[in-house]
């Protein structure tokens, strides 16, 4: 499912127009992005939790040259599904 298909599904399930559904989805994405940029966490009970995890720097190996390389540490977005979502997928 891509973004336009998701907008159509939201419009159908929530009895909204596609324009309103697009605004709602864009607002949701912006809110989640802004909160994660601040290092925050968003918990939607039953659905899941969006958070930021830190990956530490580590040593790796270049597969082409077999030489060791340094991989920089970074922050990554993380999603942990809630119990209801996990049960729905089973």
Image: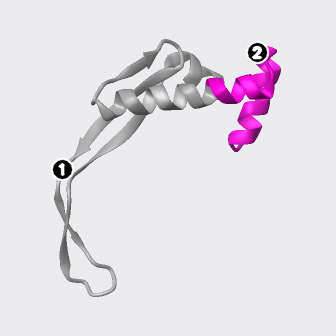
The one nearer the camera, 79 or 40, is 40
In this rendered view, identify the residue nearer to me: 54 or 65: 54
Whether residue 75 appears in this view of the structure is yes
Q: Secondary structure at mark 2?
A: helix
Q: Quadrant of residue 84?
A: top right
State the image coordinates of residue 30 (x, y, percent, origin top left).
Answer: 49, 31
Q: Is residue 10 magenta-colored?
A: yes
Q: Earlier in the sequence, mark 2 or mark 1?
A: 2
User: Residue 76, how many percent across, how many down?
Assistant: 33, 44
- Badge 2: few (under 14), some or many (20 or more) residues near its Cα, within 10 Å? few
Q: Is residue 80 visible?
A: no
Nearer-the-camera pick, 89 or 16 = 16
The quadrant holding residue 72 is: bottom left
Question: In 3D space, how far apart are the residues under numbered discs 2 and 1 (Cα atoms)?
Answer: 42 Å
Element carrying mark 1: loop
Magenta highlight: main SS: helix
Going 78% across and 23% down the picture, which residue do you hit? 11
Is 35 on the left-hand or right-hand side of 9? Answer: left
Residue at figure coordinates x 25%, y 50% from the top left: 74
The residue identified by callout 2 is 14
In percent of the image, x 79 and y 31: which residue is there?
A: 8
**Relative to 82, residue 36 above or below:** below
**Percent from the top left, x then y, of residue 27?**
56, 26
**Relative image position of residue 16 (x, y in whole percent):** 79, 18
Give the side of residue 78 with respect to residue 19, left or right: left
- Residue at position x 25%, y 84% in the image: 66
- In depth, the one of 16 and 61 nearer the eye is 16
Tell me which segment is drawn in magenta.
Answer: 1-24
**Front: mark 2 or 1:** 2
- Which of the image's four quarters has the N terminus? top right
The residue carrying mark 1 is 56
Q: Quadrant of residue 50?
A: top left
């Amino acid at each position: 499912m891509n973004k336009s298909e998701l907008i159509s599904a939201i419009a159908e399930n929530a009895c909204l127009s596609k324009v309103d559904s697009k605004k709602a989805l864009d607002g949701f994405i912006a809110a989640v992005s802004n909160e994660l940029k601040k290092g925050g966490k968003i918990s939607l009970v039953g659905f899941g939790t969006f958070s930021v995890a830190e990956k530490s720097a580590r040593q790796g190996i270049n597969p082409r040259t077999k030489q060791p390389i340094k991989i920089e540490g970074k922050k990554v977005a993380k999603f942990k599904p809630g119990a209801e979502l996990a049960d729905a997928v089973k």
